[in-house]
Image (tube, helix red, strand yellow):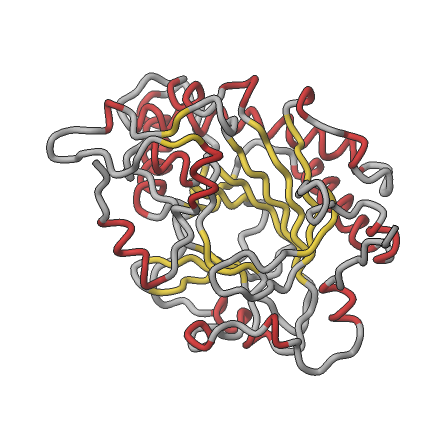
């Protein structure tokens, strides 16, 4: 029986001493004009900046103070669809443990990490250690390795595929996702009220406590000898409801805002939150799912921890809620299950396509 050949990991390529990257990682010519030095990009102070939303008063007993916090969150979701959250209530010590565990896993030799390799070619399972296949419209590879698995709720988790080393990986990840799940409920409540709905409506529409799944993806972006030619993650929007991102304070995230790529600055003790396609659909486009991408660099490894909050794949039909539709604002998205939405790749936007998709009306 033939033995499956392990794919070349980007980490191995980066450590091999190559001076130029393989052709399959070089981005198409039309993308190369706007890939700059991420450290220089982060230093720029002109132009729009990703909003910083302070959640300290999200539960304030003072109605005026509470509503001010809620309105700022709602405005950022409608204008940008992405924001830095500060004073989010997740203990710094817990975040430190999660990061140490993830970094510890990626510090293991590649041969050790390969014991957790996913089986995309066989079973098609995305869970485990892997490198991105060329599934995007460009047919190019991304400069990253990753570790991916379902993290919450417990009854949907296969803990047997989680790393046993470092020892704190399992307890730190379980505790982080449990605490984050509470923040998800609070955010969804604010977004619901922002649409004129009852507090629990959006939570119910995406599956509730029993069915909304939290998927963790640790992205590992090795140093790249030619960062001006590569991308860590190509331009895309997130298909889920919400995404929460931590990182190791190395810049890389860029957002396509008002026709330009804007670099997210590194804000200490913050979590980056994206509105995903699912919430954009339910809100009939009132909340935005923004096009974004990840740049790499030649000096520092970048690691990010992304938690994708996903509705059940087939149980719920995603479509604009009746309260978000009117004669002047007809439904902008057709009814589809989450699985159908992913399959159709409705939101695989490029800069040129984005305006066309934003303006498109669906009957």
Which residue is more in the foreground, 186 or 111?
A: 111
Q: Position of residue 304 (x, y in %)?
A: 63, 51
Q: Which quadrant holds residue 255?
A: bottom left
Q: Work out which residue is located at the far bottom of the displayed protein and give it.
A: 19
Q: Position of residue 225 (x, y in %)?
A: 67, 77
- For the point 59% across and 67% down, the residue is 296
Which residue is more in the foreground, 343 or 211?
A: 343
Q: Where 32 falls versus 350 (above or below)?
A: below
- For the point 35% across and 48% down, the residue is 80
Q: Quadrant of the C terminus?
A: top left
Q: Where 136 falls versus 16 (above or below)?
A: above
Q: Position of residue 207 (x, y in %)?
A: 49, 21
Which residue is more in the foreground, 27 or 336?
A: 336
Position of 12 compared to 311: left or right? right
Q: Position of residue 336 (x, y in %)?
A: 38, 32
Q: Which quadrant holds residue 153?
A: top right
């Amino acid at each position: 029986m033939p033995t499956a050949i392990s794919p070349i990991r980007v980490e191995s390529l980066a450590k091999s001493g190559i001076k130029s990257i393989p052709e399959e990682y070089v981005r198409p010519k039309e993308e190369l004009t706007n890939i700059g030095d991420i450290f220089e990009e982060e230093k720029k102070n002109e132009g729009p900046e990703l909003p910083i939303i302070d959640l300290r008063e999200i539960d304030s007993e003072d109605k005026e103070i509470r509503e001010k916090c809620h309105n700022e969150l709602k405005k950022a979701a409608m204008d940008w669809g992405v924001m830095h959250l500060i004073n989010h209530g997740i203990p710094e010590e817990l975040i430190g443990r999660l990061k140490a565990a993830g970094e510890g896993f990626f510090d293991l030799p590649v041969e050790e990490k390969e014991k957790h390799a996913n089986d995309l070619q066989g079973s098609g399972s995305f869970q485990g250690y892997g490198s991105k296949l060329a599934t995007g419209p460009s047919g190019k590879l991304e400069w990253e390795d990753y570790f991916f698995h379902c993290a919450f709720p417990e009854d949907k988790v296969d803990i047997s595929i989680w790393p046993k080393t470092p020892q704190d990986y399992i307890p730190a990840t379980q505790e982080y996702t449990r605490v984050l799940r509470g923040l998800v409920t609070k955010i969804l409540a604010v977004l619901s009220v922002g649409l004129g709905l009852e507090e629990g409506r959006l939570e119910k529409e995406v599956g509730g406590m029993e069915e909304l799944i939290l998927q963790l993806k640790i992205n590992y972006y090795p140093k790249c000898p030619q960062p001006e030619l590569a991308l860590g993650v190509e331009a895309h929007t997130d298909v889920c409801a919400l995404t929460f991102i931590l990182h190791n304070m190395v810049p890389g995230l860029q957002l396509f805002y008002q026709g330009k790529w804007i670099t997210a600055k590194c804000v200490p003790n913050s979590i980056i939150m994206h509105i995903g396609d699912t919430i954009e659909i339910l809100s009939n486009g009132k909340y935005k799912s923004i096009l974004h991408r990840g740049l790499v660099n030649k000096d520092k490894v970048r690691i990010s921890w992304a938690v994708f909050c996903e509705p059940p794949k087939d149980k719920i039909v995603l479509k604009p809620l009746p309260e978000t539709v009117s004669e002047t604002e007809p439904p902008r998205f057709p009814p589809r299950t989450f699985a159908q939405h992913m399959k159709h790749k409705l939101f695989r936007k490029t800069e040129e396509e984005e305006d066309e998709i934003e303006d498109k009306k669906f009957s």
